[in-house]
Image (cartoon, helix red, strand yellow):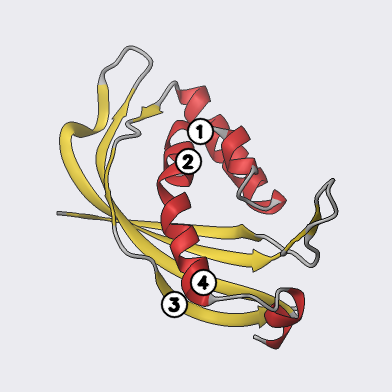
Amino acid sequence: MATILSRDPSFDMSRLLAGVKKDAPLVVKAYLTHDLATLGQHCGPELMERFAGIFRHFQAEGLVEDPTILFVGEVELVELKAIDDEPLVVVQFNCQQIKCIRDKFGNVMDGSPNSIQKVFYFWGLQQEAQGTVLPDGRVLPPRWVIKDMMVAAGRL
């Protein structure tokens, strides 16, 4: 926590969790629609590389996921730790989503258009080392980047 506060003296965990709650629908939808441009605004390069590989596989197979998100649950802090002296905040939340994957012809390959699934997301967020200096001289605190993501699905 000392490293986090040295980089951002105004850091507040509740504010970070509220920010994740606000960003979660956007990031999850970008993940489901394979929107690398949007994901790149929130995720680190290693995770982006992993996503690109997953998305290439879907594209090669001609598969499209239903991006419908019905509900996003509360964001919870799972763990706060340091990896190589860099702070990592692990959070989790769940979404209710439609579980339906179609082929390029619109045929359902997995799930169904009426299948609602509870999906658990775990994000490892890492604080950037430096803040951003704006053209007017103001300094924004270092942002938090999604370095890792794990997805676990269940049924409702």
- Label 4 SS: strand
Toward the bottom, the furthest residue is: 2
Mark 4 vs mark 1, CA separation in Å: 23 Å
Residue at 64% over, 75% down: 10
Amino acid on which the number 2 mark rests in the picture: Tyr
- Is residue 38 found left or right of 155 in the rendered image? right
Label 2: few (<14), some or many (≥20) within 10 Å? some
Q: Position of residue 63 (x, y in %)?
A: 40, 25
Residue at 79% over, 67% down: 129
Q: Examine the rendered structure and indicate whether residue 137 appears above or below residue 77.
A: above
Q: Does the CB distance between marks 1 and 2 fall below 8 Å?
A: yes
For label 2, the residue is 31
Residue at 50% over, 62% down: 123
Mark 4 vs mark 2, CA separation in Å: 18 Å
In the image, 102 versus 76, the foreground residue is: 76
Amino acid on which the number 4 mark rests in the picture: Val
Q: Examine the rendered structure and indicate whether residue 4 appears above or below residue 101.
A: below
Q: Position of residue 79 (x, y in %)?
A: 50, 80
Mark 1 vs mark 2, CA separation in Å: 5 Å
Amino acid on which the number 3 mark rests in the picture: Val
- Is residue 135 found left or right of 52 in the rendered image? right
- Label 1 SS: loop
Q: Position of residue 20 (x, y in %)?
A: 47, 59
**For residue 3, which quarter of the picture?**
bottom right
Marker disc for residue 90? 4
Asked if residue 83 shows in the view, the reply is no
**For residue 126, which quarter of the picture?**
bottom right
- Which of disc 3 and disc 1 is earlier in sequence? 1
Toward the front, the furthest residue is: 136
For label 3, the residue is 78
For label 1, the residue is 34
- Label 2 SS: helix
